[in-house]
Image: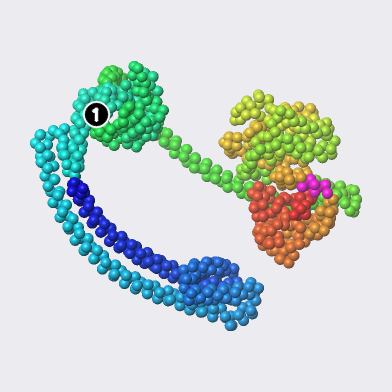
C-alpha cells in the first residue's frame, strides 16, 4: 500500500519542514519556558526589591515627618505644624501593612517587622500624642520634664537601627538569589547551543532530499511557459499539467497571473474607449449622459445618476445633472449638501461607497414589464486637483466585481480632467458671449462719452473761473477758521473754570449742610422735648415757644435740603434704581403718610384707583413716591378746607402726542386734585421754575422755597414722564403725573443726559430723606416687625436697655442723652472712636450703638469697621448718625458695617421707630 503512494513536492517539503519545525519547536519551547521563568523571576525580585526598599524609606519618612511636626508644634504652638504629623500618622500604618504582606513569609523577618511596629506605636503613644496634649494644655513644665529624659529619642534611634538592619538583610537575600539565577542562565546557554547543532544536521539531510525532487518537476513548467511566450502575447492561453504535486499549483498560479493580466488589459482598453469618447464635448450634461451610457454597461449597472459639484465654500451642493435608465417619476433627491447622505459623504470623504442589498432604496430599475429593486449600489467620487467635482452613483441587480471597481478607479482621473475641460470650455463660451455683449455696450458708451467730452471742455473753462473765485473765498475761510479755533479754546477754558466752580460749590454746600445740621440736630431734639412737656414742667406759653423754635428749625432744615438738592442737580448725582413697583401698595403708603395731616387740618382725603389698572409697573419706586408726596404735600398746604384726592387711572391716549419718546406704551396717570387756593392760568408755567411761586404773598402765608415743583418736574422727565396742571384761582388745582408703564432707562438717559433731578423734601414735616429711603428700602418682613413693635408696650422695649452713644459734639450729646433717658434707656457716651473702642474693650453689654460719622481721631467709618471685628460686637445693631444726606455718604455707612442710618437733624419719632425695629430684632435673636 505504501508503494502506491507517490509523495508530492509539497508532501516532501512539508515532511521536512515538519521535522525541522518539531525539532525547533521543542528547542524553542524548552528555551522559551526557561527564559520566561528566568525573566519572571528577575522581574519579580527586581520589582519586589524596589518596592520593599521604597516602603522602608517611606515608613522612615513618615516617622521623621511626625517627629519634626511634633517638635514644630511644641516650639511654636501653631496647629498648622500638626498637619504633617496627622498625615504621617494616617499613612505609616498603611505602608507598614504593605511591607508586612511582602515579608511575612519569613518568620525571622516577621518578628523584626512586629518589633518595628511596636517601636512606632510606642513612640506615638508615649512621645507624640503625650507631648502634643501637653502643648495643647500649655503645660510648659511637663514638656520640659519630658524632654529632659526624652524617651522618644530612644525609640527613634531604635527604629532607625531596626529599619536599616531590615534593609541590609533584604539586600543580602537579593544578591544570593541573583547568583543562583546566573548559574541557571549558563546551563541554559549550553543547552541552546547543543539543540541548534542537532537541528542543523537534520535540516541538511531534509533539504538535500527535497531539492532533487523539485528540480525535475520545475523543468516541465518552464517548458510550458516558453511555449506561451512564443505565441506573441496570447493571454487566453493556459498551462495544463496532469501531475498532482506542487507543479500543478505552480501552473494554476501562472494561469491566475494570466487572468489578472487579461483583466488589466480589459480595464486599459475600456479606459481608452471612455477617454476617446469625451473629446470634443462642450456641454456638461451631454458629457455626463454619454459617460453613463458608455460606462454603465461596462460595470453591469442597470441604473445610474451623475451629480456635479456646484458653488464654493459652505454653499457647495451636489446637483443632479442626468441619469441613466431613469423614469420621469423618480423619487431620488436632486441635490445634496456636503456630508448629506452617501452622495454628500462620498464627496466630503473622497472615497467610494459600496452597498450590498440596500433596503428602502428610493430609485428602482424599471422595464416595460417589471420593476425591480437594486441589489448593489456603488457611489464613486470624481476628483480633479484634489477636489471632488462630481459624484457618480450606479445601481445593479448583480454584484460589482473588483474588475469593475478597478475600471472606475482608472477612469476617475481621466474623467475628472474631461469634466474640468468641459467646464472650462463652457465658461469660455459664456465669457465670450458676455464679452460680445459688453463690446456692443462699450461702443454705445464711447459715442456717448465723446459727446460728454465736448460738453466737459466747456464746463472746464467755467470751472477754472469758479476755482479762482473759490480760492479767494478759501483764504477768507481759513482766516475765519483760525479766529473760531481761538474762540473755541477760550470757551473750553471758560467751561473748565465753570466746571471747577460747580464742583467747589457742590462740595461747599455739602460741607455747609453738615455744619448746619449738627447744631440744628440738638435744637430740634431739645425743642421737641420741651414742647412735648411730658414732665409738665413748662407753662403752656413756654411750650408754645418751644414749638415755634421746633417749627423754625424744621423750616431751616427744609431750606438746607433744598439747597443741597440744587447742588445735586447741578452736579448730576442722582441715579435711577429701576424695578417692579406694586401699584396696589402706593395708595396705602400715601394714606399712612397723609391721613394724620388730613385729620389735623380737618380735610377729607380720598384715594381712587381704577380697577382695570395693571398690578405692577416698571420704574424707580422711591422717586415715584417722592413726587407723589411732594404733590400731595403742596395740595394739603394750599387747601384750607374741602378735600384732597389721589386718583390712579389710565391716561388719555391724546397725552402720548406730548410724549413721543414713549412710543406705543401704555401711560399711567397719577392725579392729585384739591379744593385749595388755585393758580392763575398765566402762572401755570412759572410755578415749575426754580425759586418761583405764584406771588410773594404765597411764600409769606404758606411758606416754602419754590423748589418743590421744579424738582418734581425734572424728576418726572428723568422717569420718562411729564407733569401737567389744570387750575383756576380760588377753584382748586389738579396736578397729573404721566408715566409709561415700563420705563425705558436707556432712552431717558439719551434725552435727559444733562438733566439730574433731586429728591424732594417738600413733603410733610414729619418725613425726611433718610426716613423715606429707609422705609422704602425695608422688606415687608421688616415693616411688619416695625408695626408689631410699635403696638407693643414701649416701656418694655426701651426700659433697662443700654445704649452706647459715640458723638463728639457736646450739644448733640446733651440732646440725645436727654431724649433717650426720658424713655428709660441707660446711655454711655464716648467722645470719639478711640474712646469707644476703649469702653468696648472693658464692657460689651450694649443693646444698641449710635455712631456719629464726622469725628476726630477715629471717624465713624473706621470705628464701625473696628467694632465689626470685635467678636462680641459683630452682631450688635449700629445706627449711623450722619449730617450729610448725599447718597454716597449714606451708602458708605452701610458698606462700613452700619446696620442702619439716620440723618441729622434727628426727629425723635423716627429715632424711636428705628430703635424699636432693631431692639425687637435683638429680642428675637
Q: Is residue 145 above or below residue 402?
A: below
Question: Where on the picture, by quarter, is residue 27?
Answer: bottom left
Q: Position of residue 605 (x, y in %)?
A: 80, 34
**Looking at the image, which residue is at 49% across and 40% down?**
488
- Applied colour scheme: rainbow
For the C terminus, the quadrant is: bottom right
Q: Position of residue 514 (x, y in %)?
A: 69, 52
Q: Residue furthest front?
A: 1
Tag 1 secondary structure: helix
Name the residue nearer the viewer: 46 or 63.
46
**Looking at the image, which residue is at 35% across and 29% down?**
375
**Looking at the image, which residue is at 72% across and 57% down?**
876
Name the residue nearer the viewer: 193 or 791.
193
Q: Position of residue 501 (x, y in %)?
A: 60, 47
Name the residue nearer the viewer: 563 or 55.
55
Q: Residues within 10 Å of mark 1 (few under 14, many from 20)?
A: many
Name the residue nearer the viewer: 202 or 810.
202
For label 1, the residue is 418
Query: What span is colored magenta in the figure?
Result: 785-792
Q: Position of residue 436 (x, y in %)?
A: 26, 20
**Looking at the image, which residue is at 64% across and 53% down?**
895
Q: Is residue 580 left or right of residue 99?
A: right
Q: Residue furthest left?
A: 230
Q: Is residue 787 magenta?
A: yes
Question: Where on the picture, by quarter, is residue 724?
Answer: top right
Q: Is residue 844 above or below residue 654?
A: below
Amino acid at each position: 500500500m505504501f508503494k502506491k503512494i507517490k509523495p508530492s513536492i509539497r508532501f516532501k517539503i512539508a515532511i521536512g519542514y515538519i521535522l525541522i519545525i518539531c525539532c525547533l519547536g521543542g528547542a524553542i519551547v524548552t528555551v522559551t519556558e526557561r527564559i520566561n521563568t528566568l525573566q519572571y523571576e528577575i522581574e519579580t525580585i527586581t520589582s519586589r526589591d524596589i518596592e520593599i526598599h521604597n516602603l522602608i524609606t517611606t515608613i522612615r519618612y513618615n516617622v521623621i515627618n511626625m517627629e519634626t511636626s511634633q517638635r514644630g508644634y511644641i516650639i511654636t504652638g501653631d496647629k498648622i505644624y500638626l498637619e504633617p504629623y496627622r498625615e504621617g500618622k494616617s499613612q505609616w500604618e498603611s505602608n507598614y501593612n504593605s511591607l508586612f504582606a511582602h515579608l511575612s513569609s519569613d518568620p525571622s523577618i516577621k518578628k523584626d517587622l512586629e518589633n518595628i511596629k511596636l517601636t512606632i506605636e510606642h513612640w506615638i503613644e508615649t512621645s507624640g500624642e503625650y507631648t502634643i496634649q501637653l502643648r495643647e494644655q500649655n503645660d510648659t513644665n511637663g514638656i520640659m520634664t519630658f524632654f529632659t529624659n526624652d524617651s522618644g529619642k530612644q525609640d527613634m534611634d531604635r527604629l532607625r537601627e531596626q529599619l536599616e538592619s531590615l534593609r541590609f538583610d533584604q539586600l543580602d537575600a537579593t544578591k544570593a538569589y541573583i547568583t543562583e539565577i546566573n548559574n541557571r542562565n549558563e546551563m541554559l546557554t549550553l543547552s541552546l547551543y547543543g539543540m541548534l547543532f542537532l537541528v542543523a544536521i537534520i535540516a541538511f539531510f531534509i533539504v538535500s532530499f527535497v531539492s532533487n525532487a523539485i528540480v525535475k518537476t520545475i523543468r516541465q513548467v518552464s517548458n510550458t511557459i516558453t511555449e506561451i511566450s512564443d505565441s506573441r502575447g496570447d493571454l487566453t492561453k493556459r498551462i495544463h499539467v496532469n501531475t498532482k504535486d506542487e507543479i500543478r499549483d505552480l501552473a494554476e498560479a501562472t494561469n491566475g497571473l494570466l487572468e489578472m493580466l487579461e483583466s488589466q488589459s480589459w480595464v486599459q482598453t475600456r479606459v481608452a474607449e471612455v477617454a476617446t469618447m469625451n473629446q470634443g464635448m462642450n456641454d456638461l450634461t451631454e458629457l455626463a449622459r454619454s459617460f453613463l451610457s458608455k460606462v454603465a454597461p461596462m460595470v453591469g449597472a442597470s441604473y445610474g445618476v451623475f451629480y456635479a459639484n456646484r458653488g464654493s465654500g459652505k454653499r457647495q451642493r451636489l446637483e443632479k445633472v442626468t441619469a441613466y435608465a431613469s423614469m420621469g417619476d423618480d423619487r431620488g433627491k436632486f441635490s445634496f449638501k456636503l456630508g448629506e447622505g452617501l452622495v454628500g459623504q462620498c464627496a466630503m470623504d473622497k472615497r467610494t461607497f459600496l452597498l450590498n442589498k440596500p433596503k428602502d432604496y428610493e430609485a428602482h430599475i424599471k422595464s416595460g414589464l417589471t420593476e425591480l429593486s437594486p441589489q448593489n449600489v456603488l457611489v464613486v467620487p470624481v476628483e480633479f486637483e484634489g477636489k471632488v467635482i462630481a459624484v457618480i452613483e450606479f445601481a445593479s441587480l448583480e454584484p460589482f466585481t473588483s474588475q469593475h471597481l478597478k475600471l472606475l478607479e482608472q477612469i476617475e482621473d481621466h474623467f475628472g480632467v474631461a469634466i474640468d475641460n468641459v467646464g472650462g470650455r463652457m465658461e469660455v463660451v459664456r465669457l465670450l458671449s458676455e464679452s460680445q455683449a459688453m463690446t456692443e455696450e462699450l461702443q454705445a458708451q464711447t459715442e456717448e462719452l465723446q459727446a460728454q467730452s465736448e460738453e466737459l471742455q466747456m464746463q472746464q473753462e467755467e470751472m477754472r473761473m469758479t476755482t479762482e473765485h473759490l480760492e479767494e473765498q478759501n483764504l477768507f475761510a481759513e482766516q475765519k477758521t483760525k479766529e473760531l479755533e481761538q474762540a473755541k479754546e477760550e470757551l473750553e477754558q471758560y467751561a473748565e473754570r465753570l466746571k471747577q466752580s460747580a464742583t467747589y460749590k457742590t462740595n461747599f454746600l455739602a460741607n455747609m449742610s453738615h455744619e448746619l445740621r449738627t447744631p440744628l440736630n440738638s435744637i430740634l431734639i431739645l425743642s421737641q422735648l420741651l414742647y412735648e412737656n411730658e414732665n409738665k414742667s413748662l407753662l403752656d406759653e413756654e411750650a408754645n415757644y418751644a414749638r415755634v423754635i421746633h417749627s423754625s428749625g424744621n423750616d431751616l432744615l427744609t431750606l438746607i435740603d433744598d439747597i443741597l438738592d440744587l447742588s445735586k442737580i447741578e452736579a448730576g448725582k442722582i441715579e435711577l434704581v429701576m424695578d417692579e413697583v406694586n401699584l396696589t401698595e402706593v395708595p396705602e403708603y400715601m394714606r399712612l403718610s397723609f391721613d394724620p395731616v388730613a385729620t389735623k387740618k380737618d380735610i377729607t382725603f380720598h384715594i381712587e384707583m381704577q380697577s382695570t389698572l395693571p398690578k405692577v409697573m416698571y420704574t424707580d419706586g422711591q422717586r415715584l413716591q417722592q413726587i407723589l408726596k411732594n404733590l400731595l404735600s403742596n395740595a394739603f398746604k394750599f387747601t384750607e378746607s374741602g378735600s384732597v384726592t389721589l386718583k390712579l387711572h389710565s391716561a388719555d391716549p391724546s397725552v402720548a402726542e406730548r410724549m413721543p419718546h414713549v412710543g406705543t406704551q401704555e401711560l399711567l396717570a397719577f392725579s392729585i386734585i384739591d379744593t385749595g387756593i388755585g393758580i392763575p392760568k398765566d402762572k401755570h408755567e412759572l410755578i415749575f421754575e426754580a425759586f418761583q411761586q405764584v406771588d410773594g404773598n404765597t411764600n409769606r402765608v404758606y411758606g416754602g422755597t419754590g423748589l418743590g415743583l421744579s424738582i418734581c418736574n425734572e424728576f418726572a422727565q428723568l422717569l420718562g414722564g411729564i407733569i401737567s396742571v389744570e387750575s383756576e384761582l380760588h377753584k382748586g388745582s389738579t396736578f397729573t403725573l404721566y408715566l409709561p408703564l415700563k420705563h425705558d432707562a436707556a432712552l431717558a438717559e439719551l434725552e435727559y443726559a444733562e438733566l439730574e433731578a433731586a429728591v424732594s423734601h417738600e413733603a410733610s414735616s414729619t418725613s425726611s430723606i433718610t426716613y423715606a429711603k429707609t422705609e422704602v428700602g425695608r422688606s415687608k418682613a421688616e415693616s411688619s416687625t416695625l408695626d408689631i413693635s410699635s403696638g407693643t408696650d414701649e416701656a418694655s422695649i426701651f426700659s433697662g436697655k443700654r445704649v452706647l452713644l459715640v458723638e463728639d459734639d457736646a450739644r448733640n450729646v446733651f440732646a440725645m442723652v436727654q431724649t433717650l433717658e426720658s424713655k428709660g434707656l441707660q446711655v454711655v457716651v464716648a467722645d470719639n472712636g478711640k474712646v469707644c473702642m476703649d469702653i468696648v474693650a472693658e464692657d460689651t453689654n450694649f443693646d444698641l450703638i449710635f455712631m456719629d460719622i464726622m469725628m476726630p481721631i477715629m471717624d465713624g467709618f473706621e470705628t464701625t469697621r473696628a467694632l465689626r471685628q470685635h467678636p462680641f460686637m459683630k452682631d450688635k445693631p449700629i445706627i449711623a448718625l450722619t449730617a450729610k444726606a448725599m447718597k454716597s455718604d449714606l451708602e458708605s455707612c452701610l458698606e462700613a458695617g452700619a446696620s442702619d442710618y439716620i440723618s441729622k437733624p434727628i426727629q425723635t419719632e423716627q429715632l424711636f421707630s428705628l430703635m424699636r425695629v432693631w431692639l425687637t430684632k435683638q429680642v428675637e435673636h
